[in-house]
Image (cartoon, rainbow, N blue to C red):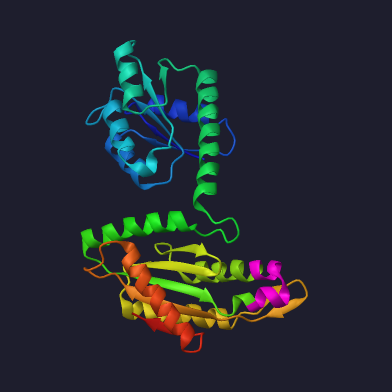
């Protein structure tokens, strides 16, 4: 797990890092510049923040408040370190969003125990988030979380005037696969399809299983012309893949509908519905096709 230590006193910061490093599987990153430390906490995946109260430019309370304004960091434990023996400061820290505080001089065992407890809570929270956001079979986003992220991406697209394209994918004749080879084989097909998509997509793109054999993909910073190339690459990759399920070897195909977000789309669902209609047209026109809307 990744812990950010932010303290303008380099000696104190390194001592605390040395204490924490005695725990297993912990990576500590030290910042003596609170502005740089804040930027790191906002941009990187972190599991805990240990921050000093008195610092130049941004004090500990201000840093905590800024971090807590970021919804993506709402579950990150924050412990504030202070030499100030003032209840008002401690209450302010807790009110700003700190989970705990430590008084200087820091006791090594107390620090280790508190960090270990905070990371245990963090690990539990991450497990809950995984269950709430990830499709259990395919390990891509589930429907609810995919639609949440898509709405956020659509707002970002509008803000920066960048393109966003949506794909709808559906396994052709999937019921026939289940009826012929069994549902376990059908599950293998869906998992393989998800893996093919993940392998072909960029890190900034994302995919979700909307239900059954239907998946949707958001291609960020991607025009319709470029999205057609991606869709064709996905279609061919699926078509050329032999899927092994037990003793069976089968081939499946996918139909794909796609559309680009337009200024007229009030919600992401407007574009998703267009892509879904294009997918329906691809099915009607013989399957294993790509139709744009």
Residue 132 appears in the figure = yes
Q: Residue at left 53%, top 24%?
A: 112
State which region is magenta. 176-187
SS assignment for the magenta stretch, majority: helix
> Magenta span has 182?
yes
Residue 230 appears in the figure = no
Q: Residue at left 55%, top 69%?
A: 213
Q: Is residue 211 left or right of residue 258?
A: right
Measuring from the top left, give residue 21's x and y in whole percent.
53, 32
Measuring from the top left, give residue 161's x and y in whole percent.
21, 65
Q: How many labels were placed on the picture?
A: 0
Q: Is residue 173 above or below residue 141?
A: below
> Magenta span has 180?
yes
> Which of the pair 144/115 is nearer the observer?
144
User: Residue furthest toward the right?
Assistant: 247
Placement of the C terminus among the 4 image quadrants: bottom left
Q: Is residue 290 left or right of residue 252?
A: left
> Which of the pair 141/18 is nearer the observer?
141
């Amino acid at each position: 797990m990744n812990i950010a230590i932010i303290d303008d006193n380099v000696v104190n910061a390194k001592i605390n890092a040395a204490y924490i490093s005695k725990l297993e599987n912990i990576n500590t990153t030290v910042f003596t510049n609170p502005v740089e430390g804040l930027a790191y906490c906002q941009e990187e995946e972190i599991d805990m923040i240990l921050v000093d109260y008195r610092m130049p430019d941004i004090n500990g309370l201000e840093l905590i408040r800024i971090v807590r304004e970021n919804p993506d960091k709402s579950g990150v434990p924050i412990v504030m370190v202070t030499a100030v023996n003032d209840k008002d400061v401690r209450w302010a820290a807790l009110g700003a969003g700190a989970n705990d505080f430590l008084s200087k001089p820091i006791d090594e065992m107390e620090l280790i125990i508190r960090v270990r407890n905070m990371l245990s809570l963090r690990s539990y929270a991450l497990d809950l988030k995984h269950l709430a956001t990830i499709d259990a079979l395919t390990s891509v986003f589930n429907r609810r979380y995919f639609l949440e992220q898509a709405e956020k991406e659509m707002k970002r697209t509008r803000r920066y005037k960048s393109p966003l394209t949506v794909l709808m994918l559906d396994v052709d004749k999937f019921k026939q696969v289940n009826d012929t080879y069994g549902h376990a084989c059908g599950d293998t097909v869906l998992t393989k399809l998800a893996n093919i998509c993940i392998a072909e997509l960029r890190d900034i793109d994302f995919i979700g299983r909307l239900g059954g054999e239907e998946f949707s993909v958001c291609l960020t910073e991607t025009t319709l012309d470029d999205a057609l190339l991606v869709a064709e690459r996905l279609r061919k990759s699926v078509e050329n893949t032999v899927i092994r399920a037990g003793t069976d070897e089968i081939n499946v195909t996918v139909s794909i509908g796609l559309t680009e977000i337009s200024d007229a789309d009030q919600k992401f669902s407007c574009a998703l519905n267009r892509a879904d209609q294009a997918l329906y047209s691809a099915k009607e026109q013989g399957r294993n096709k790509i139709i744009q809307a």
